[in-house]
Amino acid sequence: MSIIRINGATKKYDSKTVLNNIFFKLDKSDRIGLVGKNGGGKTTLLKLILNTEELTDGKIEIDRDITIGYFSQFCELDGNETIVQILDHEFAWVHKLEEELADIESQISNCTNDREMQTLINKQMTLFAEMEQHDGWNYKYKIDTVLTKLHFSKAHQHMPVAQLSGGWRNRASLALLLIKMPDVLLLDEPTNFLDTEGVTWLANWINKSQAAAIVVSHDRAFLDSVAKRIVEVENNRLHEYSGGYSDYIRQKKINIKELEREFVHEEELLIMEENSIKDRAELQKFLKNNRDNKTNVARKLADISKKITPLPAETIVTTLYEGVRTPNQIVNVENVSASYGDTQILSNVTFELFGGERLAIVGHNGCGKSTLIKMLTGKLKPSAGKISWGASTKVICFNDALDELDPDDTTGHSVYVFGDAYGAANKKINKFLRLLGFSDRDLTEKIRNLSGGQRARVALAQCLLSGCNTIILDEPTNHLDITSIQGMECALVNFPGTVIFVSHDVFFIDKTSTRLLVYENGSFMNYSGNLTMFSTNSIAASH
């Protein structure tokens, strides 16, 4: 039975149509993965359901007494209260019952009349039953569990929300929503700023919840875990696909011939995505039967990784990298440590990178991944140890490029004049930008008018066309749509230089990395292989 119904809804901003005559139903306990390009109308759809945006035409019906909770990727939580205090307010009814029980207990201890005593005991039993029915006794455990799984330290738990960083405020907002437990969850990029453990816990929480959910996410493994169907916002319309993300990829490839010209490379990206999904499934199956035979595992991984005839999309990328010269020695990190005040963040991190390797740095929030990135980019000096870059290494940082974009420049010009793109044929650059999801109209837009995801794609294009042989990226998939991530993966996999990145996106890590630096048991360990292999081996070792 549907609890939200959208009938013939249209939304325009001035003369621009974002959603056109859409129809949609959400059932009880439904799980919807909402996907589409940046700026395509995903967040607008959520705001229409929330009634914070007005329809241009059509109707949205929501059943009475339905509570809706909304998580935005841009947190509005503020104030001088701590997250513990904010969450505690959600259990005001528990505190009221506790006060009543304390009052009754006091009356019972002073009561001498048998009839009054029985009345008090009956009332006490009623209140006990109410607490039991709504699980009121465990409210502190619920708060502690949510904050622990979202990796709130004691310091963060007792810090005023206004003093938290943007990432921690986002997590505080998510914690509040999970504690509220509404009937419908509207989640806009909930996995941003979460590590892989946090993403897994959130997926399990959603699946155990009785709430219906509409989830906007670029995290494909997360969508596979929670979605019962995928709804894609494309060309101002909604297109539904049954099953999770992997099912959507298979079904979408069948329908790809109907896409417009601006999606000319999307079929190739979907083929790459489908091949990657098959490779992951094949590797997981193989590992279960060959955990102890390292030779067989290495041979199987080599077979999966064999180069096939490149797709046209890959050729577009590789022709732009012809000027990149990659040395053998990239960087040597020796026993590096880092501290903030008296707190040690990193201890004795050691690894060496060579030309063409793609290193994924993986670990839970707070383990020092971003600190390591800051040391590699020179923003932070190690408290001990040494970082030695090769003499011919040329490094560019994606996050710096993003911060340094000129808001008054246009998208096209900011790329055309950057690095090796300057002097290259515009036709080649335009094909590359189209692969990253930019239309001809997008290229004339000023940076200040772009969405967060669009600006991230501009910075990525600059990095890939810079002529540098080493690219460093810290959570590059945050705020990107899935198609943009697929284009990024294609570009990075075919990049002849070296890539160092931090990510919690399992699909992205598996498709892009050749090596891992994994935080486990209090330290970073080097691992040759992808995250699927590492996770499978870790599970086997634990048994």
Image: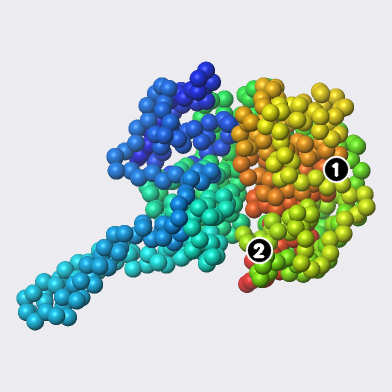
Mark 1 Cα shell of 10 Å, populated few (<14), some (14-19), many (≥20)? many
Real-space CA distance between mark 1 and mark 2, rounded to the nearest whole angstrom: 29 Å
Q: Which residue is mark 1?
A: 468
Q: In terms of image quadrants, where is residue 466?
A: top right
Image coordinates of residue 467 in percent, x first then y, are 86, 39
Asked if residue 254 shows in the view, the reply is no
Q: What residue sits 46% from the left and 36% below the top?
A: 46
Q: Which mark is residue 367?
A: 2
Q: In terms of image quadrants, where is residue 317?
A: top right
Image coordinates of residue 42 in percent, x first then y, are 52, 34
Image coordinates of residue 49 in percent, x first then y, are 41, 35
Type of the residue with mark 1: Cys
Q: Which mark is residue 199?
A: none
Question: Along the line of sight, which residue is nearer the eye, 271 or 59?
Answer: 59
Q: What residue sits 41% from the left and 21% below the top?
A: 57
Mark 2 Cα shell of 10 Å, populated few (<14), some (14-19), many (≥20)? some
